[in-house]
Image (cartoon, rainbow, N blue to C red):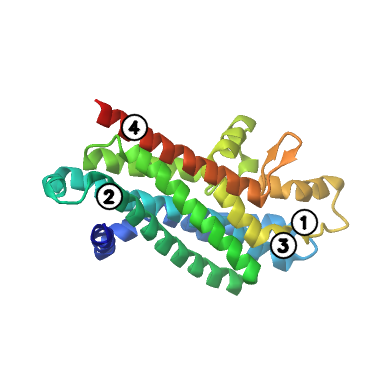
Amino acid sequence: MLMLIKRNLLLFFRDKTNVVMSLIAVFVVLGLYFLFLGDMMESGLAYSVVNTSRARPIVAGLFMGGAITLTALSISLAAMFRMVDDRRNAVKDLTVSPISQNKVTLSYLLGSAIIGMIVTLLMFIVVYIYLSIRGIHFIGIDGMALVLVTTVLTVLCTNSIVYFCAMFIKSGGAYTALNGALSTVSGFLMGAYIFIGMMPSAVQWIIKLFPLSHSVAMYRQIFVQDELANLEILPEHPQEYVDALANAPYDYGVVFSFGNFTSTFWFSAGVLLATTALFYGLSLLVHKLRKAK
C-alpha cells in the first residue's frame, strides 16, 4: 500500500500544470483581494476606527483565511482525480494486483490527505509571511498548534466530502465538471469571496450550516480575532459605528451566531470532525451496499 501512496504522490506533483490549475479558485480569492476588495474594505474600516493602521492587516487576515480553506478543498479535488482516472486507465492492473481493493481505496484516501496537508501547509507558510509583512504576528506555540489542528481537520473534512462525491463519478469529464462546480460554489458558501454580513439572511444560514465555512472561521479567529477586539471607533462617529464594530466578527465570518449561541473555535472544530465522520461513514456504507449486490 505504501508503494501505491507513493505512486499517487509522484503522479500528482509531477504534473505541475495540474497543481497550478487546481488552485484557480484560490487565485480568484487572492485576485479579488489584491485588485479591489482589499482596498475598498480597508478604506471603509480605517475611516471609522482610531487605530487605522490595523485595518489593512485585519482585512488581509480575513481573506487569507478563506484562501487557505479553499486550497485544502481544491487540492483534495485535484488529488482524488487519480482514483477516477485509474478506474478508466489502470483498473485491470489494480484488479489483478495482489493488493486488496480495500488497500487500493485506502491508498487514494491517504494519498489525497497527505497531498492536501503538504500543499495547505505550504499555503499557510506563504500566508504567514504575507501577514507578518502586513503587521499581524500571531504565531507562538499556541497559535501554531491551533493552525495545525485547523489544517488537519480541514484537510480530513474536504477529503471525506470529495471522496464521497468521487465514488459516484465514472468519467474524467464529469469529475472536471464536479471540480469546477464544487470549488466555485464552496467559495461563496464558505464566505471566501463575499463576507457573510453582505448576504441576505437566508443565505447567511446556509453559510453557517456549511461545514467548510467553519474552517474559514477558525483560521480567521487565529489571524484577526484579537485584532478586531482591540479596535476603537473614532469618538466623533455616531453609535451606529460602535454597533457595526461590535457586529464585525459576525459580519466578517470570524464567528457565527445561532440565536443566543455564538460559535467558538472548538465548536467549529467539532463541526469539521462530525462532518468528516459523517462522509467517511456514508462512503463506507456505499461500499458495503455495492459489495452486497
Query: Along the polypeptide, which appears first: circle 2 or circle 1?
Result: 1
Q: CA distance from mark 2 to mark 4?
A: 16 Å
For residue 110, say whether it is visible: yes
On residue 286, which mark appears? 4
Query: Along the polypeptide, which appears first: circle 3 or circle 1?
Result: 1
Query: Along the polypeptide, which appears first: circle 4 or circle 3?
Result: 3
Query: Along the polypeptide, which appears first: circle 4 or circle 1?
Result: 1
Q: CA distance from mark 4 to mark 3?
A: 45 Å
* Mark 2: few/some/many CA within 10 Å (<14, 14-19, 20+): some
Residue 276: x %, y % from top left: 48, 44
Residue 246: x %, y % from top left: 78, 49
What residue is shown with label 1?
48
User: Are the two marked residues, 4 and 1, in contact with CB atoms closer than 8 angstroms?
Assistant: no
Mark 4 is on which residue type?
Answer: Val
- Looking at the rendered structure, the secondary structure element under dot 3 is helix
Residue 167: x %, y % from top left: 30, 38
Q: Where is residue 168, by image quadrant?
A: top left
Front label number (4 vs 1):
4
- Looking at the rendered structure, the secondary structure element under dot 1 is helix
Front label number (2 vs 1):
2
Front label number (4 vs 3):
4
Q: CA distance from mark 3 to mark 1?
A: 15 Å
Front label number (3 vs 1):
3
For residue 60, say whether it is visible: no
- Looking at the rendered structure, the secondary structure element under dot 2 is helix
Residue in the picture at 69% in, 55% down: 44
User: Are the two marked residues, 2 and 4, in contact with CB atoms closer than 8 angstroms?
Assistant: no
What residue is shown with label 2?
103
Residue in the picture at 70% in, 57% down: 225
Query: Along the polypeptide, which appears first: circle 2 or circle 3?
Result: 2
Taking depth in this image into account, of 289 and 43 the one nearest to the observer is: 289
- Left of 287 or right of it: where is 70? right
